[in-house]
Image (cartoon, rainbow, N blue to C red):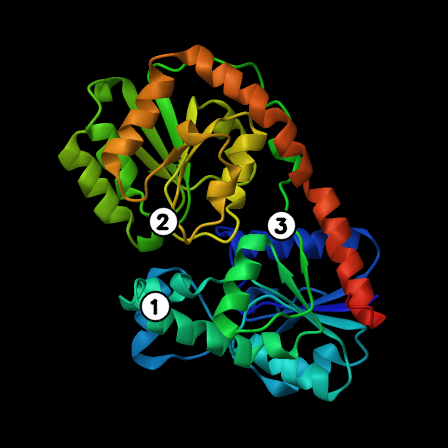
């Protein structure tokens, strides 16, 4: 098939959406499909298989995008029209200007469109101090539908959670597939001999942003009477890093902040003792699944706006959203009896197999083929 993948945001592989894009692009090319990627990454101009559009100028809001290390693409009709000409299917990743433009032009040309759902409303509204506004979030979802998803022959949802949430918000069902973004096989492979840590090591992966709520973990460890024997490894980057560093220093919590490459991350995860997922807003949280694949037991925020809580084996693997004392108790439950960690690892062993990336990518390939053949259901 000739497949066009449209990425309003691509850039460095430092977030879930970008990683999902690169994984899909690499898989489809390895399967022999002709894949053209439309994006705003200027360094891709010389690379074969890329159609590059300008970066969109948001004027006074450009500082916000820079703070989040994000460049949004401009919907250049000339570039997009040339890229999608003769395509069997156009797959759009985000409901922004480039994705909306590509969907409009593809439908006008009679080319099937599929669209992934990677952005909860709160991923946007958290940056304009409206994350907890039901009205603003609702309007955002209506805009997503208007800009993109009403034009899709098939919508790809990574979880049933986001499917049901979006359909409630827009008041209708859409032709869809629920397919996990999947976990790369590198996270399932042993990364050398296990070793004992000097301190009980808690790992937490995610962008340093408001909706990820990493401060809850720092405050929880600070509340533990064994806090001097705990080290937190925060893996990621983002606009709240300085605030989190200051909080850890003020609370006298041993916390390391760094960005791990895909090659470094599996070994770092496998070396930890426990994984904590603090995010209040999450469509799937591949980062949590990666930790589970590496053999870590997760303690997960029970936020009603997060799909990740579905991965909790029982109440000992869940903590109340924003409740540092409850999280401290859950950490203590595993800290004081390490045999519990080994027992829970066995519980999670079977669960992780269903999220292997190859199986998920085969399902994505089938979805694209069905759309191209006009077999949406």
What residue did someone put label 1 on? 134
Mark 1 and mark 2: Cα distance apart in space = 18 Å
Front-most of 358 and 258?
358
Picture quarter with the N terminus: bottom right
What residue did someone put label 3 on? 181
What residue did someone put label 2 on? 212
Are dots 3 and 1 in contact, CB under 8 Å?
Answer: no
Across and down, in percent, residue 284 comes to 53, 49
Tell me, yes or no, if residue 159 can be seen here: no
Across and down, in percent, residue 78 comes to 64, 87
Mark 3 and mark 1: Cα distance apart in space = 27 Å
Across and down, in percent, residue 137 comes to 38, 69
Q: Residues within 10 Å of mark 1 (few under 14, many from 20)?
A: few
- The residue at the far left in this view is 250
Task: Please tell me whether residue 21 is drawn above or below residue 213 in the rendered image.
Answer: below
Picture quarter with the C terminus: bottom right
Disc 1 on helix, strand or loop?
Answer: helix
Task: Please tell me whether residue 255 is drawn above or below residue 199 in the rendered image.
Answer: below
Are dots 1 and 2 in contact, CB under 8 Å?
Answer: no
Disc 3 on helix, strand or loop?
Answer: loop
Seen at 35% across and 73% down, the residue is: 136
Quadrant in the picture for residue 58: bottom left
């Amino acid at each position: 098939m000739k497949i066009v993948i449209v990425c309003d945001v691509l850039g460095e592989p430092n977030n879930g959406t970008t990683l999902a894009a690169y994984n899909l692009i690499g898989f489809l090319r390895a399967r022999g499909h002709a894949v053209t990627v439309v994006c705003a990454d200027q360094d891709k101009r010389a690379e074969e298989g890329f159609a590059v559009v300008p970066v969109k100028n948001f004027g006074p809001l450009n500082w916000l995008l820079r703070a989040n290390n994000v460049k949004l693409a401009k919907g250049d009709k000339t570039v997009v029209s040339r890229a999608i000409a003769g395509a069997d299917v156009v797959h759009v990743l985000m409901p922004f200007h480039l994705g909306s433009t590509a969907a409009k032009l593809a439908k006008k040309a009679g080319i099937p469109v599929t669209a992934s759902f990677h952005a909860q409303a709160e991923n946007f509204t958290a940056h304009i101090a409206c994350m907890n506004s039901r009205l603003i979030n609702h309007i955002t979802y209506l805009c997503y539908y208007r800009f993109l998803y009403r034009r899709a022959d098939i919508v790809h949802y990574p979880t049933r959670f986001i499917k049901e949430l979006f359909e409630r918000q827009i008041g209708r069902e859409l032709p869809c597939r629920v397919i996990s973004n999947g976990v790369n096989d590198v996270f399932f492979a042993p990364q050398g001999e296990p070793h004992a840590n000097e301190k009980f090591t808690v790992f937490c992966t995610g962008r340093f942003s408001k909706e990820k709520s990493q401060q809850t973990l720092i405050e929880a460890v600070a509340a533990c009477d064994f806090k001097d024997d705990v080290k937190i490894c925060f893996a990621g980057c983002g606009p709240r890093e300085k605030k989190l560093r200051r909080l850890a220093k003020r609370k006298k919590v041993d916390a390391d902040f760094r960005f791990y490459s895909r090659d470094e991350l599996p070994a770092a995860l496998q070396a930890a003792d426990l994984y904590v997922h603090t995010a209040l807003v999450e469509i799937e949280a591949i980062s949590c699944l990666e930790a589970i694949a590496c053999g870590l037991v997760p303690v997960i925020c029970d936020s009603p706006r997060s799909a990740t809580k579905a991965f909790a084996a029982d109440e000992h693997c869940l903590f109340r959203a924003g409740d540092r004392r409850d999280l401290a108790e859950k950490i203590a439950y595993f800290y004081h009896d390490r045999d519990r960690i080994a027992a829970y690892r066995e519980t999670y062993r079977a669960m992780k197999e269903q999220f292997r990336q190859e199986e998920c990518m085969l399902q994505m390939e089938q979805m694209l083929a069905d759309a191209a053949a006009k077999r949406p259901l």
